[in-house]
Image: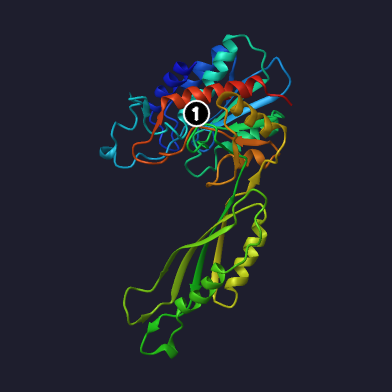
Amino acid sequence: MSEIATNIAVKLIQRESVTPDDGGCQNYMESLLAPLGFVRTSVDTGGITNSIYTRPGELKGRLAYAGHTDVVPTGPVDEWPHPPFSGLIEHGMLHGRGAQDMKASIACWIAAVADLCGEYTPLPSIQLLITSDEEGDSIDGTIRIVEQLQKNGTLPDAVIVGEPSSFKHVGDTIRRGRRGVVQIKATFHGKQGHSAYPQDADNAIHHATPALSRVADIDWGEPADGFPPTSCQITNVNGGTGATNVIPGACTALVDIRYNPGNHFEQIKASIENACEGHESTLEFDHSATAFSTPDGPFLDQVCASIKNVTGIDTVRDTGGGTSDGRFFAAVGVPVAELGLTNSTIHQVGECVAVRELAMLTKIYTDIIENFEV
């Protein structure tokens, strides 16, 4: 079983699929899944490769695995210890872009399903929901899959998202939620002029400074249970012409807010607008990700029990990190648990993962599938 996962992971890594390209990964997956009774439905939109692989079950319920075949760019190839798309195994480590995030995780799920099918184990209906648009804009990826499932009345009862959730050991952490993301471009307006004649100008930076200070001092209140506090970071400020004797007529600032479910977009928008009121500004808001949380209950309990059965670990139910495609499932009421490999080298030069982790994750996935109930 572990060899199957490793071999699949190697072949997926060897297919170059820098976002939004799929690199033929999903066709390869179809060749593995079709003999197991899966039927593929393509939901390609806007040049993105999206696939729903479905196997009808013998038992009640519908369990999904969600993942992505696209990877981030490699960075300087000459700095990699091995070619980033080699899928080389050396000293027990699998090297390559996507090793942790998240081609090896996909391989583990396929290996788990293959093992159970090979043993003629009665299973619930199984879905693999795969996109090539997670590392990019996420505009035509998983959200289009969810829309198709809604249209067909085939939303899963629960979904495992295979993002690399673990820290030191596979299964030590799952993510049951994520903070939302609001990004703001604030442009402060004035009038350019000579610094020796301030009466004829209006310094845009002088508008920006007090407003941004008020933005930084906003009290976002107590976070929702289990979530870190809302973070508001001013990430860029740009004003002036570069000359010391020119009063700037415009100043632009970028603000990045990661909010927990104790806040919501309209509240955040109003707070930023109030902080900038009276300071001649234009505000552009991008609500790029919604906060979500799966409450404690039977599904999370079962995921943690499977981890405990295989590893003996008491799992932490976390909500940290950035955002994920789990938000699209949570938005339509599907319970979400993110469970994958360790994340020590994700998005880095030299991404790699220990082969033994694939064996462990495959066993955990197998236990989850085998014991899934609705």
**Most foreground residue, 31 or 351:** 351
Residue 213 in the image: above or below residue 130: below
Looking at the image, residue 371 lies above or below residue 336: above
Residue 251, quarter of the rendered image? bottom left
Q: Give the image quarter of residue 364.
A: top right
Quarter holding the C terminus? top right
Residue depicted at x 59% and y 18%: 39
Which residue is at the front of the view, 367 or 119? 367
Label tally = 1
The answer to whether 28 is drawn above or below residue 71 in the figure is above
Q: Position of residue 230 (x, y in %)?
A: 59, 57
User: Under tag 1, what secondary structure?
Assistant: helix
The answer to whether residue 266 is left or right of residue 8 is: right
Give the residue type at disc 1. Answer: Ser
Q: Name the residue located 64 percent from the left edge and 12 percent from the top edge.
A: 121
Q: Which residue corresponds to the image point at 47% horizontal and 36% vertical from the top-left?
A: 168
Residue 262, horizontal then vertical, whole percent: 67, 55
For the point 42% across and 25% down, the residue is 355
Q: Position of residue 323 (x, y in %)?
A: 55, 45
**Image-quadrant location for residue 34:** top right
Q: Which residue is mark 1?
A: 105
Residue 184 x %, y %:
53, 61
The reply, left or right, for residue 156 in relation to residue 318 is right
